[in-house]
Image (cartoon, grey):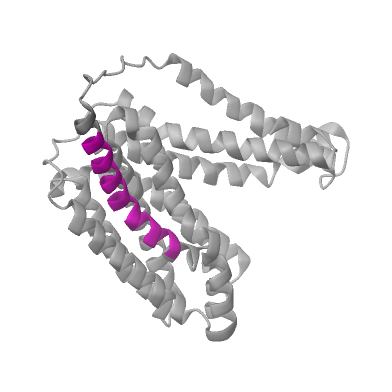
Amino acid sequence: MLVQITTRQPFIILVAAFLTGAFNMLFIVSQAPLMVKLADSENRTLLFSLNYGLSTISGAVGNLFAGQLPALFGTILHVQATSATAYQAVLITAVSLGTTATIPMWLMREPETRQAAPEPAPAEAGHSSGLVRTTVKMATPNVLIGFGAAILIPYMNVFFKDQFVISDKLLGTMFSLSSLMIGIGSLIGPRLAVRLGGKVRAVTLTQFSSLVFLMLIGFSPFYWLAAIGFLMRMMLMNMATPLYSAFCMERVPERDQGVVNSVLNISWQVGWSVGPYISGLVQETYGFTPLFLATGVLYLVAILTMWTFFRKAERPLEAVPA
């Protein structure tokens, strides 16, 4: 990222951008298996939820400061706030601050890897086929939800502007509040999973409830009602994400968690490769109504699929420590 910021050679910037994406994906893939290994069954759900919620909240806080920093660095460096030098200083500062995340990572004490006893070849083959079936089952809801999200969620700002003709300031406030709601949901999620007796039940309930608010957004004649639906949908749907991720990691052996997490991330991205293009065509011809209906149907099928596959796959959870 520093190379992208400091060089002016297009080819070097392109190579650096490719490497940034590759290494970022390595980080994303490694994160969930690491959290599974460092946490025990009592606090793992809370850890996954806090990681997801705090990342969202910190991103919102960063956005608040990001708009002010170019003017600050412009004053310090005696350049225009809109100059490349001012933006470069902001980006270098951001990347430098981001590297401080390595400090607590190096302080973590990793437990020893559990070494499974060697198995005969037939058992190993059975393990592989079973793992593939489990991975496909876990990835299927991700594909459906990813495609449903890709055709609608990135265009929520466009929908609200067209449907209710609201100001940019009001729209920005609503999106800022949505980050706060996701943070609140990250605290509620683990306790809800305990109350309901498992992560699968919690994910099913929250995602199904979010469908009600999704339809409220798409078909409410009042802005205030649609805004409530938007905030509640964001909280409920995103509350389920870390719970499902933790559940999936717990369902596979430690040695396979990295591979399975890669598949789950790729399955989510499948819909995003074609969803935005399809969404644009539908918006131009038919508006947003078909997109809300299609997303609702895809979410519903994903929820039913997950419930069918995994409703009996989990033991009741113990209480989350205060």
Vertical comparison of 162 with 143: above or below: below
Residue lying furthest front: 121
Vertical comparison of 182 with 259: above or below: below
Q: How many marks?
A: 0
Q: Is residue 259 magenta?
A: no
Magenta span: chief secondary structure:
helix
> Could you tell me which quadrant the N terminus lies in?
top right
Q: Position of residue 297 (x, y in %)?
A: 34, 72
Q: Position of residue 272 (x, y in %)?
A: 51, 59
Q: Relative to residue 120, is residue 237 drawn left or right?
A: right
Vertical comparison of 111 with 37: above or below: above
Residue occupying image coordinates x 69% and y 31%: 93
Residue occupying image coordinates x 30% and y 50%: 138
Q: Determine the image quadrant of residue 17.
A: top right
Q: Position of residue 289 (x, y in %)?
A: 45, 81
Q: Relative to residue 191, is residue 94 drawn left or right?
A: right
Q: Is residue 132 magenta?
A: yes
Residue occupying image coordinates x 61% and y 70%: 167
Q: Relative to residue 110, is residue 308 drawn left or right?
A: left
Q: Say which of 208 and 131 sits in front.
A: 131
Residue occupying image coordinates x 71% and y 40%: 69
> Could you tell me which quadrant the C terminus lies in?
top left
Q: Position of residue 191 (x, y in %)?
A: 21, 43
Vertical comparison of 100 with 274: above or below: above
Residue numbers of the magenta segment: 125-147
Asked if one can make out residue 152 in the rendered structure from this viewpoint, the answer is: yes
Asked if one can make out residue 322 in the rendered structure from this viewpoint, the answer is: no
